[in-house]
Each structure stands twice: as C-alpha cells, then as structure tokens.
C-alpha cells in the first residue's frame, strides 16, 4: 500500500508508465507547492494562521449565521483551507514523485487545487481534494455499503468514516498536555498552549459535507437547478461551491491550529520571519 493512487489505463486496466515529462511535471508541481507553503508561513505564522480578529480567533462561540459569514471569520477560514490544501498536497506530490522515479509508474495528483477550482461539492471532495484518501474511502466504505443500500447512504457513510478517522487524528495530536513553547516570540506568538480541542468538531464538519453532497445529488436531478448552474460564470460557481464548507472550516481546523500543529510542523521549513 502507498499513500497515493497509481494511474490505470481504462481500456487495459494496466498501470500507466510515467514518462520523463510526467516526472518533470510532478517535480515542478512539488516545487510550486513548497514555495506556496513557505510564503503562507512567512505571512501568517506570527498570527498562528489567524491574522483577523474574528470571534473564533478570540475563542468565542459563533451563535448566528451572521457570525459564520463575518468577513474576518471567512478570511481566517480561507487561510486554514489553503494551508491544509498545500500541506497535504506537498506530502502527496512528493510521495507521487518518489514513486514515479522508483517504480516507473505514473501516480495520480493528490490535490487538484480544490479551493480555487472546484465547481461542485462532489467535484471538490470526489475529484480534487486528497484523491488518495478518496480512493481508499470509495473502495473501503462506499462500495461495500452500496451493495446493500443506496448511493446516498453510502456517500454519507464514507464521510462519517472520514470524520471518525480525523477524530482519531485529533486525539493523537491534541489530547495531551502540551509543553509551553520555547521559540522566537515572533513565530506563532498567538498560540494558546492551554487550548483543549472540542471532540466531535471534525466529525460534524465531515457529516455536514456529506449532507451537502447528498443534497447536491438530489437537486442535480432538477432541471431548474441544472439550468441555473449552467448560466452562472465559472468564478461564481467556484465561490458558491467553497461557501458550502468555508464558514465551517474552523470545525476542522481549530483542533490542529489552536493546538499549534502548524507551528510544530513549520520547524522543518525555511521561511521568512521577523527577528527583532
């Protein structure tokens, strides 16, 4: 097993060989992703990746739709989404590049810029975000459940399984006593080492997106909705797509960001920071 997906020829069912152009493309993609991560770290590390003073950044509960749609809150959530997209994408692209060089087989790109290019929730989660995990969930959860139930139930079960997996990650990374951070005060100086993750928030985030996926499938059968979607410009479709999840991105990001996971992770990178 590998943390990536091999590309298969649809006609023969055989794995596709990687050409020198494929390997060059993977190398360029990995390099671009790394540079993007370094830029994001340089810009937002001093604020623990929450540069805008939203209610969530102040660790206050959001209680209304207005709170969730607050521009400061959405700005922080967007940065969270971009950071995780790039970090997961770097791991996937570097792994794919290594596998292509070592085995000669072409690997599937794990991240396909979902935050900026997805045109529907199913496009976001099914074809662009972490394709390797999507493939594992499809084979391990969706298809087995689909044998005994509808595709709607199978999709929900896949998202619930993903939520359980991420709750396990939260337990590993956040449910322990973190030592006070000894580092430059200008790097993650907003970090609260006493923060305790709220268990269930990752599950709630993925369950919500599972419901959104099922709703999309149901509405997609409606001719009015089909024609409405086809008349909108692409940038508006992308915006509406990301807004189905962005206001709730803190449900996913809080346990990792507020416990300093990104601050710990960034110690392996060279980025620009203020030293005086």
Image (spheres, rainbow, N blue to C red):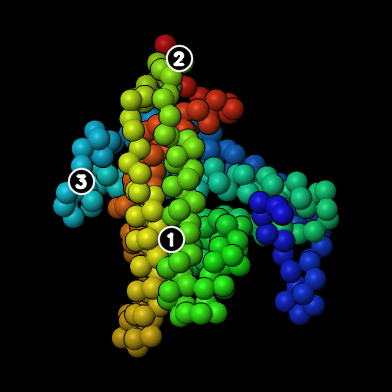
Q: Position of residue 261 (x, y in %)?
A: 46, 33
Residue 160 badge? 1
Q: How crowded is mark 2: few (under 14 residues within 10 Å), some or many (20 or more)?
A: few
Mark 1 and mark 3: Cα distance apart in space: 24 Å
Q: Tell me if I can see residue 235 in this picture.
A: no
Residue at horizontal 23 percent and vertical 51 percent from the top: 68
Instruction: Report the front residue among 149 and 34.
Output: 149
Residue 62 badge? 3
Residue 182 badge? 2
When the figure is inspected, residue 37 is found, relative to residue 133, above or below; the finding is: above
Q: Earlier in the sequence, mark 2 or mark 3?
A: 3
Q: Earlier in the sequence, mark 1 or mark 3?
A: 3
- Which of the 4 image quarters holds residue 171? top left
For discs 1 and 3, the disc positioned in front in the rendered view: 1
Residue at horizontal 45 percent and vertical 14 percent from the top: 182
Instruction: Report the front residue among 2 and 66.
Output: 2
For discs 1 and 2, the disc positioned in front in the rendered view: 1
Residue at horizontal 41 percent and vertical 25 percent from the top: 177
Instruction: Locate the C terminus and report the quarter of the image it occupies.
Output: top left
Q: How crowded is mark 1: few (under 14 residues within 10 Å), some or many (20 or more)?
A: many
- Which of the 4 image quarters holds residue 15? bottom right
**Does 66 sit left or right of 44 as displayed?**
left
Mark 2 and mark 3: Cα distance apart in space: 31 Å
When the figure is inspected, residue 139 is found, relative to residue 224, above or below; the finding is: above
Q: Tell me if I can see residue 106 in this picture.
A: yes
Q: Where is residue 28 in the image (x, y as percent from the top left)?
A: 68, 47
Q: Earlier in the sequence, mark 1 or mark 2?
A: 1
**Does 223 sit left or right of 136 as displayed?**
left
**Does 102 sit left or right of 219 as displayed?**
right
């Amino acid at each position: 097993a590998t943390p990536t997906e091999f590309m298969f020829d649809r006609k023969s069912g055989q794995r596709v060989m990687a050409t020198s152009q494929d390997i060059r493309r993977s190398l360029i993609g990995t390099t671009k992703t790394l540079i993007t991560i370094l830029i994001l770290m340089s810009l937002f590390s001093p604020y623990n990746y929450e540069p805008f003073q939203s209610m969530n950044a102040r660790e206050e509960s959001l209680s209304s739709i207005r709170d969730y749609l607050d521009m400061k809150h959405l700005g922080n959530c967007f940065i969270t989404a971009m950071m995780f997209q790039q970090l997961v994408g770097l791991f996937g692209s570097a792994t794919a590049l290594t596998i292509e060089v070592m085995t000669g087989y072409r690997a599937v790109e794990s991240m396909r810029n979902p935050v900026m290019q997805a045109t529907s929730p199913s496009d976001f989660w099914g074809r662009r975000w972490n394709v390797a995990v999507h493939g594992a969930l499809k084979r391990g959860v969706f298809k087995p459940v689909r044998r005994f139930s509808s595709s709607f139930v199978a999709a929900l079960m896949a998202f619930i399984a993903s939520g359980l997996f991420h709750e396990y990650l939260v337990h590993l990374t956040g449910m322990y006593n973190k030592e006070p951070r000894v580092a430059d005060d200008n790097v993650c100086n907003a970090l609260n080492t006493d923060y305790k993750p709220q268990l269930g928030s990752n599950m709630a985030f993925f369950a919500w997106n599972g419901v959104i996926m099922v709703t999309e499938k149901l509405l997609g059968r409606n001719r009015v909705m089909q024609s409405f979607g086809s008349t909108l410009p692409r940038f508006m479709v992308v915006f509406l797509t990301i807004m189905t999840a962005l206001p709730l991105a803190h449900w996913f990001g809080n346990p990792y960001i507020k416990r300093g996971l990104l601050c710990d992770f960034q110690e392996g990178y060279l980025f620009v920071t203020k030293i005086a």
